[in-house]
Image: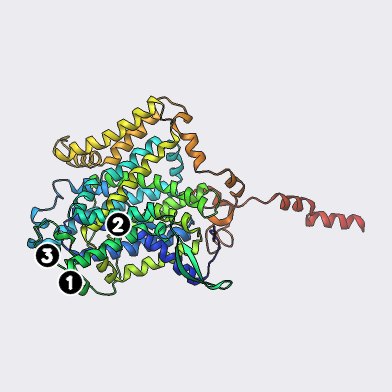
């Protein structure tokens, strides 16, 4: 690593590396609100879309600072999570929340009409309330230390279907955006694949400056660092050129119309430059039992993914294995982040970004200060609403092409967990196959028969409807249940190999490192009592070194010296 976790690069490099992490997280941060607007009837209100994106940037930046300063204390970026989208879709598929047919027709939508505003705000407030209640559950799991107990029974056969079904359940959203113009979406996918796979080892000369070498040329693998960003920008520019030559039709009902880049140009001029997002900006959040249980399934999936990200980030940035207290604190802070995201009205929660962990391995920069800089940049972007308006003008097919790659990778990441499992075992093949298939079949059937569950208690019907409509909950539940009830050894289940993969042998000697200590002297100059050892998220008081013990034993007490002096005289 060029810079380890506790190193402080020069300020200009911090800005450069922080901008790089911001750009790496840009794809996911933009994608989540874009998908969400479709189910809350906002697909034609570009003005509100830009505000929603700005709010997402603002909350993501604030949560990143919280996590780095007071949470896990690793250089890890926080942002919107795809894990919450599937239960959100399930919640919005209930009869009470399905969008009226006229909201999908651009010519019939008047974005300033109070009726239309109330339609999308009701749905967004319902999502907000569910996220906030589910966040309280995550806060409890983290700060109580319960996450360690849950992870004891969670193995690769639970993680694989849960994570994979996040990507598979979003295929319809990807297909709808990509299908707006398959030529543009295919071009976007092709560019991303070209940059990330074929050109990833191609070095490009870039001007650089250092005190030792002065002005010089530095060769960098920029295509490997920013494949998604480059793919989106190139396709976006080409779409602008084709729009200027009227290659795309100007009829809203014609194929290829949504590939135009001038559909939302008026938003850029209308929206203000500066705006501070605030809690309750869409109204007072509402809570329903069904939505809360659905989002809780996303919370569990997000926690499992984050624990894996913590270990991967620690290995890459030169930190020791995360302590139990640090993990508890990290999950608890993520819960606080979800609570803030719900209160501010992003329509989503926050989680650790795996793509930024991967970028750290490429750039060889693991400094905590760099991620603090990234968090500050995200905060600034959240205050500049004009930036969100510009990003909202990216054509749907370009976003759809990006989804084709991103959702495919999410699916593959989940399946990659099976590398630790003995897949020659018929037991494991059955558990994974049944979990995946049931996670596709049951939600699909429930979506076509929403009124099929009739227990006589409406809130209970809605709870079962949302849970059974959420692919990752169904697949994860069967994976968890079958893996813990069907007899099998830990080696066969992949538990031993999985634990070894997240724990390097070399880290055991560094476990007493102070990189997970709280900042500003908390635990060293204040709050230093022995009571800390009983709090699951507080760093334990450091044990004295062997040399210190020997010195202490060799040094006589004050009373011993006085007795010795009295004896002499």
Q: Secondary structure at mark 3?
A: helix
> In the image, which is nearer the foreground, mark 2 or mark 1?
1
Residue 109: x %, y % from top left: 10, 62
Q: CA distance from mark 1 to mark 3?
A: 21 Å
Label 3 belongs to which residue?
Answer: 114
Circle nearer the N terminus (2, 1): 1
State the residue position of label 1. Answer: 266
Whether the residues at callouts 1 and 3 have beta carbons within 8 Å, the answer is no
Please identify, in this view, whether the residue under mark 1 or under mark 3 is nearer the observer.
1
Marks 2 and 1 close (CB-CB < 8 Å) = no
The span from disc 3 to disc 2 (Cα, nearest Å) is 23 Å
Is disc 2 placed on a helix, strand or loop?
helix
Q: Is residue 386 left or right of residue 528?
A: left
In the picture shown, does residue 334 fall above or below 488?
A: below
Quarter of the rendering containing residue 527: bottom right
- Could you say whether the residue bearing mark 1 is in a helix, strand or loop? helix
- Quarter the N terminus occupies: bottom right
Q: Residues within 10 Å of mark 1 (few under 14, many from 20)?
A: few
**Viewed as shown, does residue 23 lie left or right of 509?**
left
Where residue 342 is drawn, which disc sits there? 2
């Amino acid at each position: 690593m060029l810079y380890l976790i506790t190193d402080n690069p020069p300020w200009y490099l911090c800005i450069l590396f922080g901008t790089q992490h911001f750009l790496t997280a840009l794809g996911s941060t933009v994608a989540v609100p874009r998908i969400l607007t479709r189910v809350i009837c906002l697909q034609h209100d570009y003005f509100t879309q830009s505000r929603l994106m700005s709010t997402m940037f603002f909350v993501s930046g604030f949560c990143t600072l919280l996590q780095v300063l007071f949470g896990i204390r690793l250089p890890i970026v926080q942002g919107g999570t795809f894990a919450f989208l599937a239960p959100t879709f399930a919640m919005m598929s209930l009869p009470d929340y399905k969008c009226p047919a006229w909201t999908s027709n651009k010519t019939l939508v008047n974005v300033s009409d109070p009726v239309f505003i109330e339609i999308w705000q009701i749905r967004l407030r319902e999502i907000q309330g569910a996220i906030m209640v589910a966040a309280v559950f995550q806060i409890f799991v983290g700060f109580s230390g319960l996450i360690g107990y849950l992870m004891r029974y969670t193995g690769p056969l639970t993680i694989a279907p849960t994570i994979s079904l996040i990507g598979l359940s979003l295929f319809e959203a990807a297909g709808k955006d990509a299908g707006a113009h398959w030529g543009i979406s295919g071009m976007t996918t092709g560019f991303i694949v070209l940059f990330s796979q074929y050109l990833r080892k191609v070095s490009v000369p870039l001007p650089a400056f250092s005190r030792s070498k002065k002005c010089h040329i530095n060769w960098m693998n920029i295509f490997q660092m920013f494949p998604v960003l480059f793919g989106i920008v190139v396709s976006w520019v080409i779409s602008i050129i084709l729009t200027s030559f009227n290659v795309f039709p100007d009829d809203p009902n014609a194929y290829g119309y949504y590939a135009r880049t001038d559909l939302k140009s008026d938003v850029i001029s209308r929206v203000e430059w500066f705006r501070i997002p605030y809690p309750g900006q869409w109204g007072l959040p509402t809570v329903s039992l069904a939505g809360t249980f659905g989002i809780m399934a996303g919370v569990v999936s997000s926690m499992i993914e984050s624990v894996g990200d913590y270990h991967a980030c620690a290995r890459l940035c030169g930190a020791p294995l995360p302590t139990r207290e640090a993990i508890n604190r990290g999950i608890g802070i993520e819960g606080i982040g979800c609570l803030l995201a719900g209160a501010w009205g992003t329509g989503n929660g926050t989680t650790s970004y795996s793509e930024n962990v991967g970028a750290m391995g490429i750039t060889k920069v693991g400094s905590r200060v760099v991620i603090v800089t990234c968090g500050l940049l995200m905060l600034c972007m959240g205050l500049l609403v004009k930036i969100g308006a510009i990003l909202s003008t990216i054509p749907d097919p370009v976003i759809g092409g990006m989804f084709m790659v991103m959702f495919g990778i999410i699916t593959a990441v989940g399946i990659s967990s099976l590398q630790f499992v003995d897949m020659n075992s018929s037991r494991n093949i059955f558990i994974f196959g049944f979990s995946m298939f049931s996670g596709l079949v049951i939600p699909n059937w429930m979506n076509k028969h929403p009124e099929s569950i009739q227990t006589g208690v409406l809130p209970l019907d809605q709870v079962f409807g949302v849970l059974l409509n959420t692919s990752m909950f169904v697949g994860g539940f069967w994976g968890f249940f079958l893996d813990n009830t069907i007899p099998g050894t830990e080696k066969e289940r992949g538990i031993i190999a999985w634990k070894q993969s997240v724990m390097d042998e070399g880290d055991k000697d560094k476990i007493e490192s102070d990189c997970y200590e709280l900042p500003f002297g908390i635990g060293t100059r204040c709050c230093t009592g022995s009571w800390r050892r009983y709090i699951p998220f507080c760093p334990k008081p450091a044990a004295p070194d062997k040399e210190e013990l020997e010195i202490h034993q060799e040094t006589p007490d004050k009373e011993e010296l006085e007795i010795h002096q009295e004896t002499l005289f």
